Amino acid sequence: MRAEARDLLLSDVERRVALREIGAFRTLSDEAIGAIARLSRRRALPPGSATVIAPGAERTLMKLLSGDLHVTRMGRASAVTHDPRVLGMYWLARDSMPLELKTDGGAVVLELPGSGMDEVLEEHFSVWLGVAQSIATWLLNLAPASSSRVIERRLGADASRLTERIAAVQEAMPFARGYVDALMQLDEEAATVRYQAGDVVWRPGDAADGVLVLLDGALRGVAPDEPSGIGSLELFANRPRVTALEAVAPTTVLRIGKEILFDLVEDHHELARDLLAMIAAAIVQTIE
């Protein structure tokens, strides 16, 4: 990563300007960006220096202001060293592998402590939305939905039974397995929908206004790493559908509307944080 030199006095206004250069923060309110700016700190790295972040140490988000910075993970140069989002991605993914940050000619960074960012994510849902949109977009670009990919689930039991539906939601949303009350809330508010073989659930260009949890049957046209039900990456990325989704057998699903899902993650911060971690971990796994 390399950045152009800039005035490093870093007034509050300059911090805000630097932070808005981060894709996930560009559309945040002044209140939200101010909360992030207040916990940021300037740090200078001398030429030829190396900083080791040991396993288990607190991860810190960094915005490169000037100079050069190279990231090594587990002794290997990061595959996306040129991408300034990578340090934040390791933090979001709760990555525990050793990291080493090196600079040849020196660097100046704006640091955002991980613990402080956790608090900002909890207090400002708009920050969570911005981060979710940014990383969901990144993962979709790495692994887009495929018109030929099929997901199948054979229940072999009554789809109306609560235990069977909760088990299906846990499979579709593995980050939420420990949040039984939240899963019960989702099941209560979701709609059960049935399709016949050949039915088209959505078409390219349709709005991504909900996600599906497969109870029984088979669907074709999905992304490989959906974190929160079928179609969730496009929903979080605020993108229209890019492939048709078609039932290839008699199929029963739970349909969870966008507002229902967003209300859930806004009300359950730990669950929301685990969801971000799952998307970020999928990105780290893909790029590394």
Image: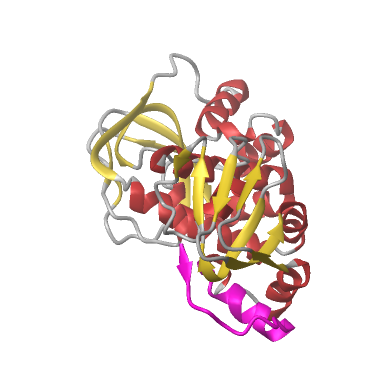
Q: In the rendering, at what x and y percent does residue 14 appear?
A: 65, 83
The reply to whether the magenta stretch includes residue 231 is no
Q: Does the image show residue 11?
A: yes
Which image quadrant for residue 41? bottom right
Q: Nearer the viewer, residue 72 or 198?
A: 72
Determine the residue positioned at 69% across, 39% down. Answer: 182
Residue 124 picture quarter: bottom right
Q: Quadrant of residue 19?
A: bottom right
Q: Residue at x 69, y 85 (%)?
A: 13
Q: Is residue 23 left or right of residue 45?
A: left
Stretch of the chain drawn in magenta: 1-23
Depth check: give the residue in front, 105 or 36.
Answer: 105
In the figure, is residue 8 to the left or right of 194?
right
Residue 228 appearing in the image = no
Q: Is residue 223 above or below residue 214?
A: below
* Whole-percent x, y for residue 201 in the image: 32, 46
Nearer to the camera, 266 or 56: 56
**What residue is drawn where x is 69% and y is 30%?**
178
Q: Position of residue 106 (x, y in %)?
A: 56, 65
Q: The C terminus appears in which quarter of the rendering?
A: top left
Vertical side of 69 occupied by 19: above or below: below
Residue 254 is left or right of residue 17, and the answer is left
Residue 10 colored in magenta in the image = yes
